[in-house]
Image: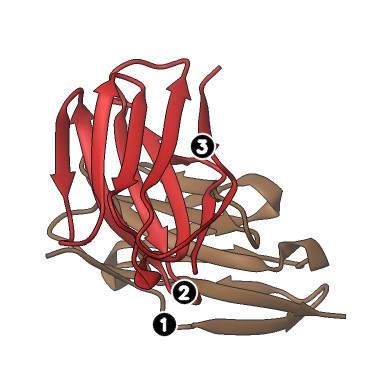
Amino acid sequence: AQSVTQPDIHITVSEGASLELRCNYSYGATPYLFWYVQSPGQGLQLLLKYFSGDTLVQGIKGFEAEFKRSQSSFNLRKPSVHWSDAAEYFCAVGFGNEKLTFGTGTRLTIIP
Amino acid sequence: SQTIHQWPATLVQPVGSPLSLECTVEGTSNPNLYWYRQAAGRGLQLLFYSVGIGQISSEVPQNLSASRPQDRQFILSSKKLLLSDSGFYLCAWRSWSGNGYTFGSGTRLTVV
């Protein structure tokens, strides 16, 4: 069965520092890959997605993610975080039109 | 444009009372629809999904039920709420294009 692992439950970074959130998946084939962000009390917003092609994908709010087939990973990065990036981040995988499998999320705290 | 509406935003209900949460989608037809729940500090739990009118798949046995009376309407119900039903409920939809989910803004349910 497919699964998604986000090994970091909580990450704290300083404003202006770089960020990398990890996501690993287990799937029979290369799935579609997604990153979502959730601000407190809000729904989830799509940051970026990977279907095929260039393994480095750009998203909204200055985020990017790199798909590495050999490592079954799809890590989310941002070169310089802003206080407004504090939120919960979810990685998700799926194939075609089947339902997505979500990771358990990583909570990001930004310190001044 | 495509939008998703979810209401109410917050709800406080006594134990044993009924529940009805509604989700509607605009600007698309024949979407896949999903109900998720987030308990405090936990990830997303898929409750129900629907690929068409009257077609409901349940992911976990529970005190809740779902219905899809119209193509773009998805309703989450309970006859008698339990304390454990408290949480943040999210509706989502997905088109046949294979894109990721679009989430509603969520309903915070507190059962007292």
Q: Secondary structure at mark 2?
A: loop
Q: Chain of mark 3?
A: B
- Determine crowd level at label 3: few under 14, some 14-19, many 20+ residues with C-alpha closer than 10 A: many
Give the letter of the chain under mark 2.
A
Marks 3/2 same chain: no
Amino acid identity at mark 2:
Arg
**CB atoms at circles 1 and 2 under 8 Å apart?**
yes
What color is chain B drawn in?
red
- Depth-wise, is mark 1 or mark 2 nearer the camera? 1
Q: Is residue B71 left or right of residue B22?
A: left
Q: Which numbered disc, 3 or 2, marks the residue closer to the eye?
A: 3
Q: Earlier in the sequence, mark 1 or mark 2?
A: 1
The colour style of the image is: by chain
> Which picture quadrant has residue A1?
bottom left
Res B32 quadrant in image: top left
Could you say whether the residue bearing mark 3 is in a helix, strand or loop?
strand
Chain letter, brown in picture? A
Which residue position is annotated with label 3? Answer: B6
Query: According to the image, label 1 marks what residue?
Result: A7
- Between residue B54 and residue B85, name the one nearer to us: B85
Residue at horizontal 64 percent and vertical 75 percent from the top: A108
Binning the other alpha carbons within 10 Å of mark 2 as few (below 14), some (14 to 19) or many (20 upward) gives some
Residue type, label 3 = Gln
Q: Which mark is residue A22?
A: 2
> How far is mark 1 from mark 2, CA to CA?
7 Å
Disc on res. A64: none
Mark 1 nearby-residue class (10 Å; few <14, some 14–19, many ≥20): some
Whether residue A72 can be seen here: yes
Q: Is residue A107 above or below residue A51?
A: below
Closest to the observer, B95 or B16: B16
Residue B96 in the figure: left or right of residue A109: left
Q: Please report, as a chain letter, where disc 1 is located.
A: A
